[in-house]
């Protein structure tokens, strides 16, 4: 039986940019990661956005972390759209193909949720996934997220409309499992 990978979240370094660009530019998985129509992501535009995002720090800025698996970058984990009055934020993770199907997503989203609740004093974390992304939905459920609703035929995915599944976890639910 293969050993369980060691998953952690850490700040991004310049050494991570190649992998992160590869994930961002992957048109085969675009709809799992973006609400916009697929399009090429030139490296120069990616680098400008990736390095420029760090300049706008503050309480409502996106929190961008790298998912590290056994000492190697394997994806990204982000908290964004912070609402400081209601104490919630949206979460998202992106994984390299080699990291999928190994429990990495579940471990990463659990750590991201913990970071949001413990370090940012959030009360709620929410996310969304296209309905055909069953692996992501399973990983989120394993991490304690519950399906809160659907936006029917809300996304255009590879030539057909798909539902968006809205999921969330409350701090009280997370605390009950820790």
Image (cartoon, rainbow, N blue to C red):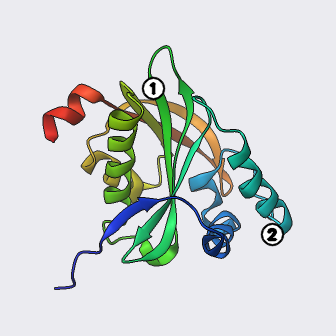
Q: Is residue 93 left or right of residue 14?
A: left
On the image, the x and y values in percent for residue 51 come to 74, 56
Measure how far apart labels 1 and 2 are at the Cα level.
32 Å
For label 2, count other residues whose C-alpha is less than 10 Å away and answer few (under 14), some (14-19) or many (20+). some
Q: Residue at x 32, y 53 (%)?
A: 138
On the image, the x and y values in percent for residue 178 come to 15, 42
The correct choice, above or below, for 9 with respect to 156 in the image is: below
Please state, as top left, top right, bottom left or bottom right, where the N terminus lies in the image.
bottom left
Q: Is residue 92 left or right of residue 146?
A: right
Residue position marked by numbered label 1 in the rendering: 88
Which is more toward the observer, 145 or 8?
8
Query: In the rendered image, which quarter is residue 81 located in?
Result: top right
Q: Is residue 70 left or right of residue 38?
A: left
Which is more toward the observer, 65 or 4?
65
Query: In the rendered image, which quarter is residue 49 located in?
Result: bottom right
Q: Using the image, tell me which numbered label, if any, was put on residue 98.
A: none
Q: Secondary structure at mark 2?
A: helix
Q: Residue at x 41, y 77 (%)?
A: 71
Q: Earlier in the sequence, mark 1 or mark 2?
A: 2
Q: Secondary structure at mark 1?
A: strand
Residue position marked by numbered label 2 in the rendering: 43
Which is more toward the observer, 100 or 119?
119
Residue lying furthest bottom: 1
Query: In the rendered image, which quarter is residue 50 located in?
Result: bottom right
On the image, the x and y values in percent for residue 177 come to 15, 40
The correct choice, above or below, for 32 with respect to 117 in the image is: below
Q: Residue at x 51, y 65 (%)?
A: 75
């Amino acid at each position: 039986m293969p050993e369980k990978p060691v998953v952690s979240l850490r700040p991004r370094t310049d050494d991570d940019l190649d992998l992160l660009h590869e994930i961002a530019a992957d048109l085969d998985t675009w709809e799992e990661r973006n609400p916009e129509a697929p399009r090429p992501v030139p490296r120069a535009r990616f680098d400008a956005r990736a390095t420029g995002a760090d300049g706008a720090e503050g309480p409502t800025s996106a929190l961008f972390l790298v998912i590290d698996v056994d000492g190697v970058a394997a994806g990204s984990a982000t908290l964004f759209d912070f609402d400081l009055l209601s104490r919630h934020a949206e979460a998202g993770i992106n994984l390299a193909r080699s990291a999928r199907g190994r429990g990495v997503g579940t471990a990463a989203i659990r750590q991201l949720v913990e970071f949001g609740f413990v370090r940012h004093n959030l009360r709620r974390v929410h996310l969304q996934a296209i309905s055909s992304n069953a692996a992501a939905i399973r990983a989120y459920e394993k991490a304690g997220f519950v399906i809160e609703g659907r936006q029917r035929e809300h996304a255009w995915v590879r030539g057909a409309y798909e539902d968006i599944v809205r999921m969330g976890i409350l701090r009280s639910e997370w605390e009950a499992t820790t």
